[in-house]
Amino acid sequence: MRPEDYQPPLTWWSHLWRLGLMLVISGVAWGSRAGYQWDHARWWFIADVSVGIVCYVLIWFRRRYPVPVAALTNLASIISASSAGAGTLAMVSLSTRRRWREIIPQAILALGCGVLGEEFFNVPDVQEPAVLRYGILVAIIATMVAWGMYIGSRRELLASWRARAILAEAEREAEVRQARSVERARIAREMHDVLAHRISTVSMYAGALSYRDDLDRDQVRATAQTIQETSRMALTELREVLGVLREGPGDAEPEQPQALPDDLDSLIDDGRRGGMRIEYMCSADLTGLAPARFRTLYRCLQEALTNARKHAPAATVTVRIKGDAERGVDLIVDNPLPLRDDDAMMPPRSGFGLVGVAERVALSGGRQSAVRTDDRRFVLHVWLPWQS
């Protein structure tokens, strides 16, 4: 992280208290010299104040040009004691960057300029031991560097915490968006699985009513009654699915309403009542199949029958289910392809049904294939593991 990345913006209050502290430091440093300069070296008094004012102007550019400002204020300290406040802030500000290649040269320069100032621009009336004067000078420079490095370290730590918080918030928002996307996909799969089976039946009967003009009144009434019952069942199942989705169950757990082994026979009978010709063979005892796996098996068979009704309504559909706890369970749905497509009668092709089947099977740890054979047959093969 660069120093520029964790330097906090300064408010008017930040500028104000820094200015006040600089004036206090300058007043303490210049207080012992001001009287002597005014009485004995008026030019020195004017030069000291002028250089100090220049340093106070330069200090506002310390963040943009930290090294030049620190160097100029250090050089100014040779002749000007009133620039001590600005020089202190410049050195502390430079040290907050925590770059030794910048700090060490400026610390040496500050020490050298301080020695020159004590030797050539010291007040004659104030005489102290050299060891004490230079010891105090070294201590002041070390204190400025240490204080600046502490401030820089604290700023970097706060900036890293702030960056982590922003990153965590961004990750949380991304997880929320992903969860919403997964939930939308799950809702779409549930809606398709539940409604497509019923709506395809309604579409087939409604198409027969609009296509055939040789039906008597009783046949039309029976067909309309079938459409009404199927539509009511679709609305009931839609209400059940929406109720389930509002409860928010976990995707890893089986969801209600749950399909049971007997529901496969009901699904086959329902298709036969809808006019399909189905040959159904089941040689597996599905009572020991994991509930989540059976749900996937049920949905795959439901989707296969729906596709057969939509795309090959007059064909004979062969359904075979076999397997056991060791080999898993196989679902094979086989039907001949239609000789031609009647655009007026066929429902639109979406292709999402097989995509949903493949996704469900993959999430269950199984395999799925949907192929068209050379003898114009469509075969859907699904294999699922027996247990979760």
Image (cartoon, grey):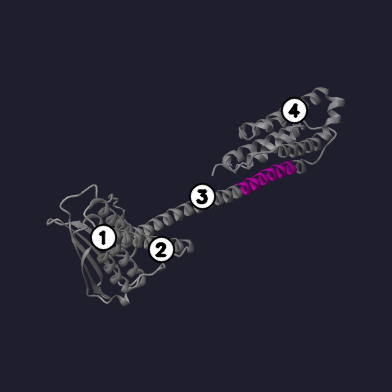
Residue span colored magenta:
134-155
Q: Is residue 358 visible?
A: no
Which label sits on residue 372?
Answer: none
Of badges 2 and 4, the one in the foreground is 2
Label 1 element class: helix
Name the amino acid, label 4.
Ile
Which amino acid, mark 2? Answer: Thr
| Mark earlier in primary sequence (1, 3) | 3
Lateral position of residue 99 relative to residue 275, left or right: right
Residue nearest the viewer, comparing 229 with 364: 229
Image point (26%, 66%), residue name: 273
* Disc 3: which residue: 170
Labelled pair 4, 3 in contact (Cβ < 8 Å) = no
Task: Residue 375: name its quadrant.
Answer: bottom left
Frontmost of labels 2 and 1 is 1
Q: Mark 4 and mark 2 in contact (Cβ < 8 Å)?
A: no
Per the image, the residue denoted by label 2 is 236
Please state if 164 lies on the left or on the right of 63 as rendered: left
Cα distance in 3D space between marks 4 and 1: 106 Å
* Residue indicated by mark 4: 53
Point out the frontmost of discs 4 and 1: 1
Q: Is residue 66 magenta?
A: no
Using the image, determine if residue 296 lies above or below residue 287: above
Tell me the CA gap for discs 1 and 3.
62 Å
Q: Mark 4 and 1 residues: CB-CB less than 8 Å, in contact?
A: no
Residue furthest out toward the front: 217
Q: Quadrant of residue 59?
A: top right
Q: CA distance from mark 2 to mark 4?
A: 85 Å
